[in-house]
């Protein structure tokens, strides 16, 4: 099975990147299933019904979320009927929506889990105890399991990958918005990357206006972060080749798509743009 996983799509620039690059990625990789993290779709915070439907129309089949899942309160009006939406699993049992979805692709059932890390994140149920019980149960039904671990620290993400090596298809990190260079297949056949990276504006700090982020750090006062709106966009993703029998991975390929003239190296942001 061929699967594409697209990293956190941030705001209108992220949407531009999807429109620009997803068709050519689909042509190149011919994925049978495409997953995207959409927790920052609506101005960098949360998701609306319109954007949820828009992303599905672009050819994404399932949308995972994260710590910003409920930032746009509109989600409460449509989450119950949004069959392709997966919010963090380790939230209170009263939380609407689902943190695990089983999706049938041809004759294979793919389980998709979205889960929050515990380190440097808002409180959530224990990542490891939750997953140990959950994976044991899910494996009774399918060997094809993709975990989107939405977490801050690389060590926590690596620990999840090593703990479930050979027991799940892939452990894919999201949330930090910076693609890590450690995409690999572990000994047991589980694919892993600490962070898939961001889909959004290059002229940004993790998708937001540099001036706002700098202002927040320098002034140490609460500063509202506006998304960076730009035509210089980036799409970060990983492609997975999955064995239909074992549910394990034979190839993980990180994808980092941007126009040549818009690579990080060539973008100059003058310091006085910030003030
Ligand atoms: Fe996040």
Image (cartoon, rainbow, N blue to C red):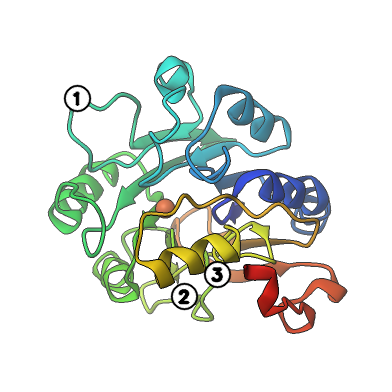
Determine whether the residue tagged by mark 1 lies in a helix, strand or loop: loop
For image coordinates 52% across by 39% down, the residue present is 63
Q: Position of residue 274 (x, y in %)?
A: 63, 69
Q: Is residue 47 above or below residue 146?
A: above
Residue placed under numbered mark 2 in the picture: 185
When the figure is inspected, residue 122 is found, relative to residue 154, above or below; the finding is: above
Q: Is mark 1 within 8 Å of ligand 1?
A: no
Name the N-terminal-most of marks 1 and 2: 1
Residue 256 versus residue 107: which sits nearer the camera?
Answer: 256
Image quadrant in which the C terminus is located: bottom right
The earlier-in-sequence mark between 3 and 2 is 2
**Residue 86, quarter of picture:** top left
The foreground one among 142 and 74 is 74
Tag of residue 250: 3
Place of residue 171 in the rendered image (x, y in percent of width and height, measured from the top left): 40, 62
Of circles 1 and 3, the one toward us is 1
Q: Position of residue 68 (x, y in %)?
A: 40, 43
For the point 44% across and 42% down, which residue is it?
65
Q: Is residue 53 left or right of residue 20?
A: left
Residue 240 as seen in the image, left or right of residue 261: left
Q: Tag on residue 219?
A: none
Q: What kind of element bears circle 3?
A: strand
Q: How much space separates mark 1 and mark 2, taking CA atoms?
A: 36 Å
Res 94 label: 1
> What crowding class fits label 3: few (fewer than 14 Cα within 10 Å), some (14-19), or many (20 or more)?
few
Say if disc 2 is inside 8 Å of ligand 1: no
Contact? badges 3 and 2 (CB < 8 Å): yes
Can residue 190 be seen in the rendering of this structure? Answer: no
Mark 3 or mark 2, which is nearer to you? 2
Q: Residue furthest bottom?
A: 265
């Amino acid at each position: 099975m061929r699967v594409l996983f697209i990293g956190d799509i941030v705001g209108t620039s992220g949407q531009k990147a999807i429109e620009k690059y997803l068709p050519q990625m689909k042509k190149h990789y011919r994925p049978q299933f495409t997953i995207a993290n959409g927790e920052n779709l609506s101005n960098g915070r949360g998701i609306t019904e319109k954007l949820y439907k828009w992303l599905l129309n672009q050819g994404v089949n399932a949308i995972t979320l994260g710590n910003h899942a409920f930032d746009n309160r509109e989600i409460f009006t449509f989450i119950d009927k949004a069959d392709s939406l997966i919010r963090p699993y380790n939230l209170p049992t009263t939380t609407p929506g689902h943190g695990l979805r089983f999706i049938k692709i041809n004759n294979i059932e793919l389980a998709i889990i979205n889960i929050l890390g515990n380190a440097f994140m808002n409180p959530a149920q224990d990542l490891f105890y939750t997953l140990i019980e959950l994976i044991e149960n899910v494996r009774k039904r399918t060997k094809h399991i993709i975990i989107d671990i939405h977490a801050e620290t690389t060590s926590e993400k690596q620990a999840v990958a090593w703990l479930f090596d050979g027991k799940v298809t892939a452990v894919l990190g999201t949330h930090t918005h910076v693609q890590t260079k450690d995409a690999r297949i572990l000994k047991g056949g589980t694919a892993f990357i600490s962070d898939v990276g961001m889909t959004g504006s290059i002229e940004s700090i993790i998708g937001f206006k540099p001036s706002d982020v700098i202002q927040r750090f320098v002034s140490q006062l609460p500063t509202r972060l506006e998304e960076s709106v730009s035509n210089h966009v980036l799409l970060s993703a990983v492609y997975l080749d999955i064995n239909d029998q074992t549910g394990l991975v034979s190839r993980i390929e990180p994808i980092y798509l941007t126009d040549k003239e818009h690579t990080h190296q060539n973008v100059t942001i003058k310091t006085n743009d910030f003030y």
